[in-house]
Image (cartoon, rainbow, N blue to C red):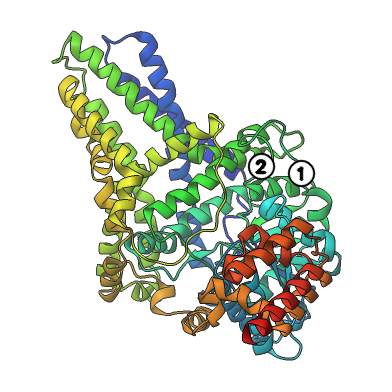
Amino acid sequence: MSGDPCSSRAGPRALLAVLTILTTAGGAWVFWQSLHADGPAWLSLVLLSVFVVLFSLVSFSFWMATAGFVCALLAKRALPQEANEPRLAAAAPGKTAIVMPIYNESPHRVFSGLRAIHESLQATGQGRAFDFFVLSDTTNPDVWLAEELAWARLNQAIGDGSRVYYRHRPKNAGRKAGNIADFCQRWGWAYRYMIVLDADSVMSGETMVEMVRRMDDDPETGILQVPPMPVNQVSLLARCQQFAASVYGPVFLQGFAWWSHVDGNYWGHNAIIRIEPFVNHCGLSRLPGAEPLGGEILSHDFVEAALMRRAGLKVRLATDLDGSYEECPPSLIDFAQRDQRWCQGNMQHIRLVFSSGLHPVSRLHLGLGAMSYLSSPIWLLFLVLSFLLASISDTAGRDAPHGAAGWWPLGLFAATMLMLLLPKLWGFILLACDAKRLARCGGATRAAASVAIETAVSMLVSPIMMAFHSNFVISTFLGRRIEWTAQRRDEQGQQLLAAVSAHWKQSLAGLAAALAIWSVAPAMLPWLAPVLVGLLLAIPLSVLVSSVPIGRAMASRNFLATPEETAVPQVLQRHRHLLGLPPLRELTDPGGVFRRILADPAFVALHRSVLLATDAARPAEPEQIELAERQLIAGGPARVSIENRRAILSDPAALHALHRFAWTRTRKDAS
């Protein structure tokens, strides 16, 4: 970044690599000294190799966060406070499309966010440079119709000059990446840039205008990613994630931007993309072989960033911009389900790392993305091998002075914990250096207590997520694919029966492991206690951390508070207000929306016009039309099957015919 005093330093990648290698080498030497000398040599060497992989990841993350901490401190000294605020462009910004791909999401939630963004952009005076596109891949026909009603209501509220467009694809080929590609092929030629949003994204107008200004100023930038801040959720787990992102996130983001520089990454949303090179160079082909490791590329964003860099354009991270928001999963099970979808895509990156022509840093991004999930089964393997070696050595001599009670493992454990925990301290120190932000986080005492709460929750939850991730990785390599469904965004807590169903195997595995360690190598119990406790208590922990009442109690006492919560930005205030308004009755009664289109000629006309304008009309089979009519006679609109509704709604002529048929039946019944 132009205002980052660390950005011009020579050799940041070499420095980070040297620090990581030296730290890993030192840790490996200490670990080798702590190994049981009477164990099999081959087992010790395998265990050492696994340790080197894991410790290098911990070291890399630690030094990246430390570099980010130093850069942030230098930036605070070098720049006045207002330098980090976005500034409105003096000239008209380049024509930009704001695209929001959606898939079976709550229409009320989606269009409330879009309206808040639209109003924020209009307030900048630059709104004419932006058009909005809602790109629906929704497969549920009732949600599809509800989206059209919500879109029509939004345009009515905006009034004359509305430039919010809606398109529904007949088939969601290529998932989100295919949805974006379809937009680019059809309408991308009319725009210089596109800002990609997720269904839960909210961005301020000032930030969007500044993003466009930066792209206008640097024609060599292909992607500019603005880090999204998680907001709006209340459960204990969500509040911990929001607090962690707000307090610790800056040190990691600054460190990431420091070493990646123009070879950054793209996270799939809350980013601006230069459309022409994206269309020319970032098309995704199918991977050879069967799913899940073959077929369509699932985690497309990392790959698109790599292709943009291969084309010679910059991919940058705007760490100094705020006004970018998203929502996080409210419960532990929702968190795991989201990660399961991402895991399959990231496992494909293992193959893509070796694609021809990629920049070395792009390969590193892809590799680290895969390791974010592979590290869990590797950690599990490390624990199993450690137990195996300890049990063999204990059989030979339980009182060996070089065993688990020695000083070497204690020092190594302390060093590892320090590298994991010190970035949290760096984040807290940065927070303490900013009096305004510190006050918005509840003050020094409450912020420090919040760090302790978040640390305790993350330590307890980490073994559970390790178990989930290990299962996801193994399932992926065994060829088991999952369906990508819409993320649950409403907060209802976690039911006990659902927690039992999701976690009983983890608790049982934790109990079996604890008994085995206690009977064979009891000296290891203190070392593995953090892992075992999390697994043993997985069921009650899942209910506890997903609790909305506990989260609200924390909020009422200003624990785990973030600046976005205590000093709510205007665009988020408007978003919350709109979410609180009563939605259309049809949006809360899915069955009612199909009933309405059969009874409302204006709704039929609206739906048909959208189909024809977006080239989305597809003919229904005569058998489907006849079956829909029989189902309508037998039990009314509610009896028409999902498949037949979808077919009828895709065919303007069939819809018109069924609409007239329903009216005829209504008149006959009335007479």
**Number of marks:** 2
567 or 486: nearer the viewer: 486
235 or 70: nearer the viewer: 235
Residue beneath the point at 43% across and 30% down: 378
Q: In which quarter of the image is residue 405?
A: top left
Near mark 2 (Cα within 10 A), the count class, few <14, some 14-19 or many ≥20, is many
Q: Is residue 656 above or below residue 401?
A: below
**Marks 1 and 2 in Cβ contact (< 8 Å):** yes
532 or 468: nearer the viewer: 468
Q: Position of residue 240 (x, y in %)?
A: 35, 60
Q: Is residue 393 above or below residue 165?
A: above
Of the 4 image quadrants, the one containing the N terminus is bottom right
Q: Position of residue 473 (x, y in %)?
A: 49, 35
Q: Can residue 169 be seen in this view?
A: no
Amino acid under disc 1: Arg
Residue beneath the point at 49% across and 84% down: 582
Going from N to C along the chain, the mark reached first, 1 or 2, is 1
> Residue tagged by mark 1?
310
The residues tagged by marks 1 and 2 sit, at their Cα atoms, a distance apart of 9 Å
Q: Position of residue 369 (x, y in %)?
A: 56, 42
- Relative to 506, 120 lies left or right: right
- Relative to 165, 34 lies left or right: left
Q: Position of residue 520 (x, y in %)?
A: 18, 19
Residue beneath the point at 36% across and 46% down: 502
Q: Can residue 157 be seen in this view?
A: yes
> Residue tagged by mark 2?
362
- Relative to 564, 555 lies left or right: left
Q: Quadrant of residue 204?
A: bottom right
- Look at the numbered disc 2 and give the secondary structure of its residue: helix
